[in-house]
Structures are given as structure tokens and as C-alpha cells.
Amino acid sequence: MTVHLLGIRHHGPGSARAVATALAELAPDIVLIEGPPEADKLVELAASEEMEPPVALLAYAVDDSTRAAFWPFAVFSPEWQAIKYGLAAGVPVRFCDLPAAQQFASSGGRSSSMDPIGTLAAAGGYDDPERWWDDVIESRRDGAEPFTVIADAMRELRHGEEATGREAQREAYMRTVIRKAQREGFERIAVVCGAWHVPALELPLPPATHDQRILKGLPKRKIACTWVPWTHGRLAATSGYGAGITSPGWYHHLFTAPDQITTRWLTKVAQVLRAEDLPVSSAHVIEAVRLADTLAAMRERPLAGLSEVTEATRAVLCGGNDVLLDLVTREAVVGELLGSVPGETPQAPVAADFAAHARRLRMKRDATERVIELDLRKPNDLDKSRLLHRLRILGVHWGVPATDERRAQGTFREMWRLAWDPGLEVELVAAGAHGTTVLGAATTVMLKAADSTTLADVTAALEKSLLADLADALPPLLQGIDTRAAADADVGHLMAALPSLARASRYGDVRGTDTAGLAAVAGRMVSRVCAGLARTVHGLDPDAAAAVQELIDGVQDATALLAEEVRAEWLDTLQGLSDRASVPPLIRGRLTRLMLDTSRLPDHEVELRLGRSLSPGTPTADAAGYVEGFLAGGGLLLVHDERLLALVDAWLGGIPDDAFVEVLPLLRRTFGTFAAPERRSIGARARVLADPSSVVVADDNDLDAELAVAPLPVVARLLGVG
């Protein structure tokens, strides 16, 4: 009876190749692999043609799905090669690490913090552990068995050191699994585990009672386990993965390339650059290969490693441009390869429902970001939109709106950016706490939002529910809004909630949703706002006035989406406040501008008010506030109305020097909001006011008569003129 310990580094192509070779030579009758034993029943799925690494085992606590962990595998992971060998050879494959049921139920205490790879690299004269391991293990292609040397090195590192905490528990359980395999009569046992654990698993094993004492009394939780797709990006150390590597794409290449490693890699790099329309020729590739091989020879390396090919890429293919090198690192060195799992893989209920919807709608999960456009008049596109909005409610942000949702209201067009992150699998599992389907779980989340204490939160939840077509959530949310609006005496709260409610009232036109009660609730809220607005705007300081102005602008836009009588009530209220002395200058200026834009005030009345507010007797700060509010709607008004421009120009010219310094920041903020063409036009008109002789009269001879006549038929048709 023999136990062969194959100490490996997780996700190492050299280790993976060595494991595959060793297993073929040893022909074990059982293979034990470091991983959660709860996944033993899932091993057979790895034989499916639909299983394409990178993939990961996902284990989660049934009673608390936020407690979850992943065990990722790439094609170059030694554990994956061990699984594939066992399935092909028809021998049992079992996981032998401490069960997730116990890992999730206890903290496990402190474990050893030694970095064995870093220690060995330093002993070998390397300042970079990755480079040492790459030289010694990953770049080896001679098939030499490394496990004896690895075991000797780890034995030396662990000499006199006793495992503690979670590490001791894990190794005790591994020994327990080995003993069990021996009792079952297996003669040739292969154990694939992290190199650090090898000395603790060597024969003779300590008495079983020793390990029983370590494991005694460990609490347990009920665990569920499944396979999920993974990505190379998630294997990278930069993702936060504890066993992450710096270059998944490079390691994948090392493991899968049959020969000419350097040439094939730099050819791939050239393809990445050419895809960006960069001029990279075959001569560039040849020169880069020569440089990489030369660097490897000078450094006495067995093969050009990642550092050599990277330096050759930077110097030859990227011309020293680090921005292009970052592109190569992202696309090739790390990569975003997304794996796949068989359709029969067990899934959490919400995850299974989501997968069924995604298949029906032909929405492929892809790690690379892409933008899609949806036409909500098409049933299939409307269903895609509903699914994406429901997922966002559940915290599964597969899709993010690519356009401003508010500006897109009232249209049949939606743009989404889609990018699948394997971490979203945990969110799908967690969503199971709210229901068994995407629709049911999203509805439950929104029903809980109906109990929120703030009016704005409930209104926002209603808007989300309409976008996601959660019909069962709408009545309680609508009732919650009406109740809170009636009880809330804070006009600011009502004003903040109105825009989303008004937008929601228009969804029925676009999505076919029944929103009959929304407009009535919104109308009642507008009436309450109108009744209390005078008190709200009375005697505000400048900062408070600015905040209220934003609320007024929001309600102004919102009432444009509501019934005409509601809009009229709102505008009547604004008109009554627009020239009241107790209203702050900023708000008075803004209300006067709104009255002008809605034809509620004649031009001469607006000119009179502006002139009065900018008169010498008005404090400079008040006048500046009035101008800021008045011009907040844009600068084109000053371009087209010379009288108003003259008033503002004369006021600016008459500000005393000391006062001008104080109001300059405000003026810059005001005029800085104008578009560049507006500012240029205002400047040109102001120059004419100061010097009428500067007007340039166009020469009719400069006109191209043929070009001028060409658009006339189109203009005539637009105007309905014969």
C-alpha cells in the first residue's frame, strides 16, 4: 500500500503537466484532491463536453447564502488535470480538504503566515518569487519529476514548526481521508495538494486519535455545492483572489502550446495589437522573438519567460509605449476567457430560473463588455429589459444602462452595457432568500421597500418596479407613497419624490404597464407642494436657496409629464412667487426665467424685473444671485435678446472693484455652465454693444448661390409651403 504525495502550486502549468505525467506513470487506483468533500458528487460533471474551464466549485451555506466560497480551476490547474485523469482512467476522485460545512461554521483560528515560495526564491537568489517558480517549475518542459525536490524543500521549511488553527484542522482532515482510503483497500493512493501540506501528510501518519482531537467539536452548517463558470481575470492576483497568479493568459499559453512557445505567444500579441488597427508586421514578430530568446540566453533561463517576452513586446511591438503594453497585459497576459458548465449542473433556484430566461432570450454571458440596444416595441427586447431591471433590483448588475435613464424616458430605446462577472453567481444564490424565481425574488425585495420610512425611497422603488414590470409590487408601493405624501409635512421631501413618480406615470405609454393611479397620486402631491412652497422658500440663506432651486427645477420637469391642469396649478404658484420680496434673489431669478420660458410673462415685464434687480441700489451679492437664477436655463437668451444682454452688461460694468472680487466665483459658476458656442456668441454681441463700429457686414458676393438654393425645397416642405 503506497501513498504518493504530489505537492503542487495552485494554477501552475508546470505543476499541471508534472501531475498529468506522474499520474499516468503511477496509475493510482484512487485520486485525492485538495478541495471541499461536498463536491465529490459533482466530479462526474467534469467529463461533460459542455464543461469548459476556467470553472469553479461554488459552496454556500443553505441557511445564509452570503457565506460562500469558490474553488477555481483552469485548464492549467494541477487539480483539474487530476480530475480529468481520474475520470478518464475510471478511478475514484475525491476531495480531501476540510469540509466547507465546518469552514463556514467556525473561524478556525490563526494559521501559519509563512510564504514558502517567497522563502525558497530568496534562498535561490531571486527577489521575485513568481520569477523563481516560473524558472524552476512552470517553464520546465523536460518532463522531469519535481515532486521529490518540492517535498524535500517543504520538509526543510517546516522543520520544527507545528501547524496551528485552521491549517492544523485542514491537515488533520486530509490525513483522515487518506486513512479512510487505506481502510477501503485502495493500494495506490495519489494525493494532489498544495506543496506546503506535503510534509504533514507523509507516512507514517500520526495516530487517528491525534487528528480526532483536533477535529472534535467543530460546528457544521448545511452546505450546497455547484459548478459555475469562471474567468482568467478572476484567477489573477489583482482580483483579490488569495491564490491568484499574475498572468493567467500566459500560463494558459504555456500549458496548451505544443511547441515554439515564444513564437506562438508573440504572434498572439501581434494579433491583439492588429485588432486595434496598429501596424505590426511579421518582421516585428520575428525581431521580438529573437530579442526574447536572446534575453533568456543571457540570463541563463531554460526558456524565455514572461519577463523576457514582455520586454520584447514593449521594445519591438509596442515601440516603448506603456499604454499599448497595458493593452497587451489586459488582453493577452491576463485575458478574459470565460468558461462554461453543463446544463444539468445543479443550481440554486433563482440561478436556474435566470439561466432559463437567458437561454430563452439568447443572452449569452460574456466577460467582455459589450453594448446592446433594445427596442421596447419588440416583445423579445422588452423581456430582456425586464430581466435586466429585475436583476439590478437583486444586486446582480450584469447590465448597466449605457444612457441616462431619466433622459431616455418616453422613448422606446434602451442601451445597456453587459459584462458578466462570475462573482454575480453568489448574488444569484443570495437572491434565493427572497424567492425561487427572478420575478418572485425581485417582487419580494420591492415589497420590503414599501415599508421604507422615507417617501423618496418608496417612490424610487416604485420606479424600479415599473421598469421591471413587477405588477404585484405596484399596489402596495403606490399606497405607501400616497400615505407618506399625505403625512409628510416637509415640502422638500415631496418635491424630491415627484420627478421619479412623474416619470413612472409615463411608463404605461412605452411599456404597456397600467399606471392609472400614479398620475392621481402625483397630482395630489403637486397640490401639497403648491400649498407649502411659499413657506419653504421664505428667507432662505444662499446654500439652502440653491438646494431648493434644484428641487424646483426637478418639479418643473416632472409636471411637464403630468396632466395640463396639474401643470397649470404649479405654474400659477410659481408666478405668484416670482416677484415676491421675501423670496431669495436666486429663486426669484429662476422663477422669472421659468415664467418667460413658459410664456407666463411678457418680454417687457421680464426686462423691467431684471433691470430693477440689477439697479445700483441692489446689493451686488443679491444682484449676482438673481442673474445666476435667471440664466440657469442657458445663455442663448442673451444671444437673442439684446435688451437683456445690455442690462446684464451694464450691471457687470458698474460693479465696484471690491465687490467684483466677491461675486466673481458666482459669476464664473453661472457663465461656466454655458456651452462654448454660447459664450463666444455672447462675447461677440457684448463687443458690438461696446463698439457698434465693430459689426462686420457680410458681402453678398461671398455667398455661393448654388449651395444656398439647394436646401430650399426641403425647408419649404418642412414649413408646408408650396
Image (cartoon, rainbow, N blue to C red):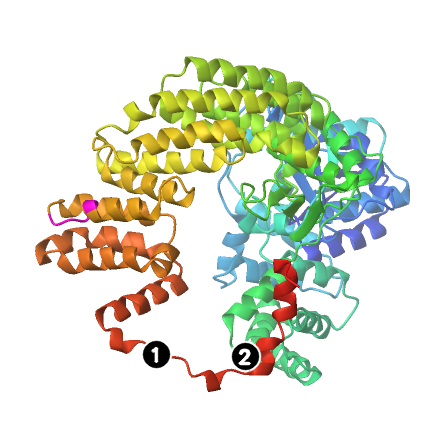
Q: For the point 16% across and 60% down, which residue is it?
A: 653
Residue bearing mark 1:
696
Where does residue 602 sit, x and y in percent of width and height?
A: 35, 44
Where does residue 121 sit, x and y in percent of width and height?
A: 52, 58
Residue in front for this viewpoint, 191 or 560:
560
Residue in front for this viewpoint, 719 or 488:
719
Q: For the point 54% across and 51% down, which residue is it?
A: 238
Q: Which of the marked residues, 1 or 2, is nearer the chain's N terminus?
A: 2
Q: Amino acid at mark 2?
A: Gly
Q: Is residue 168 visible?
A: no
As measured in the structure, the alpha-carbon distance from the residue carrying label 1 to the one carrying label 2 is 51 Å
- Callout 2 environment at 10 Å: few (<14), some (14 to 19), or many (20+)? few
Q: Main secondary structure of the magenta part?
A: loop
Residue 270 sits in which quadrant? bottom right
**Local SS, label 1:** loop
Residue bearing mark 2:
319
Q: Is residue 499 left or right of residue 691?
A: right
Residue 309: within the magenta? no
Q: Amino acid at mark 1?
A: Val
Residue range highlighted in magenta? 612-616
Residue in front for this viewpoint, 469 or 506:
506
Residue 613: within the magenta? yes
552 is higher (above) or lower (below) than 666: above
Q: Residue furthest front?
A: 722
Q: For the point 51% across and 47% down, which residue is it?
A: 115
Q: Is residue 132 visible?
A: yes
